[in-house]
Amino acid sequence: MVVRRHGRVGAAVVTTVGLLVCGTSVTGCAGGGAAAEEARSGTDAVEVLHRAAAALVHAGSSKARTSMEMATGGTRVTIRGEGVYDYRDRLGRLQVTLPKDPAGTEEHRPITELLAPGALFMKNRGAGVPADKWVRVDTATLSDGNLVTGGVTDPWAAAELLRGVRSATYVGRTEIAGTSVRHYRGVADLGLAARSASAANREPLQAAAKGFATAEVPFDAYIDDQGRIRKVRHRFSFVNGRQKTAVAVASTTLLYDFGVPVDVRLPEAGDIFVGRIAEQ
């Protein structure tokens, strides 16, 4: 995997199963092994989830598909994204598709987003931004830590949120896109996640811990036998700054095709828009 990085930015886990001492009965050994695996998966749920981010670094990269559902009052919208992410260099590129206007009459051009340590770059950001320019956002200044602002949750941030798990339940085995996975359910604490996160994510997650309506984030995570996240769904709650009403957000991240080549080129200084962004 070759990753070329240009421009500037302001800067496996394998779930082990305990050995089962079997008797002379072959049937008894097989059945006991399965029972031991499930029991251990439940006992070690927190440990498995804490190590999920490290497993992604070991994998190197993946493709990603995201879905963010927002609901406030009687309005519900869904924003979708698709792209690639490099977990070693913390670089990603996603194409984000916005929903139609409520009347269904206006189509929005997809937004290209580049994810980098401490920064979010957006192209086709909207009114007031030239078509050839990028908007740069310092993620540490966002009250949601860029878990919601970009319309997607940064895949690395989604993984590091699991470092904040205090307790979790092993639900059982299932499949994601034909891959056998373990399903875990629990609640992550943003404050703990921030303290345990890598340096680039520490400040954004600290901002989210203060900015969200609650620092507790319910989740469902699906982990494969190499300890990698295949799917994670977080449920956030924050207060809309304009309307002062709570907004419920369900953010789902799917990861697949691990080890794919990732080439992310960050914008040069001259390609970044420095004017005022029109209100949307």
Image (cartoon, rainbow, N blue to C red):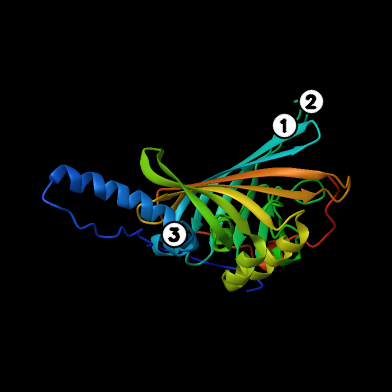
Residue 210, x across and y down, in percent: 76, 63
Q: CA distance from mark 2 to mark 3?
A: 45 Å
Q: Earlier in the sequence, mark 2 or mark 3?
A: 3
Residue 26 point in image, percent of width and height: 13, 45
Q: Nearer the viewer, mark 1 or mark 3?
A: 3
Left or right, residue 40 beside residue 69: left
Horizontal placement of 68 versus 248: left or right?
A: left
Mark 3 surroundings within 10 Å by alpha-carbon count, few (fewer than 14), some (14 through 19), many (20 or more): many
Q: Which residue is mark 1?
A: 100
Q: Quadrant of the N terminus?
A: bottom left
Residue located beneath label 2 in the image: 103
Residue ID for mark 3: 48
Q: Is residue 10 above or below residue 80?
A: below
| Image x and y of residue 278, in percent | 85, 49
Q: Secondary structure at mark 1?
A: loop
Q: Secondary structure at mark 3?
A: helix
- Residue at figure coordinates x 68%, y 47% from the top left: 151
- State the SS at label 2: loop
Three-letter amino acid code at the position of disc 3: Val
Residue at image coords 39%, 60%: 59
Q: Amino acid at mark 1?
A: Lys
Residue 250 in view in this figure = yes
Using the numbered discs, state the Cα–Cα distance from disc 2 to disc 1 in whole angstroms. Answer: 8 Å
Give yes or no for contact between labels 2 and 1 (Cβ–Cβ under 8 Å): yes
Give amino acid for label 2: Ala
Left or right: 22 with respect to 180? Answer: left
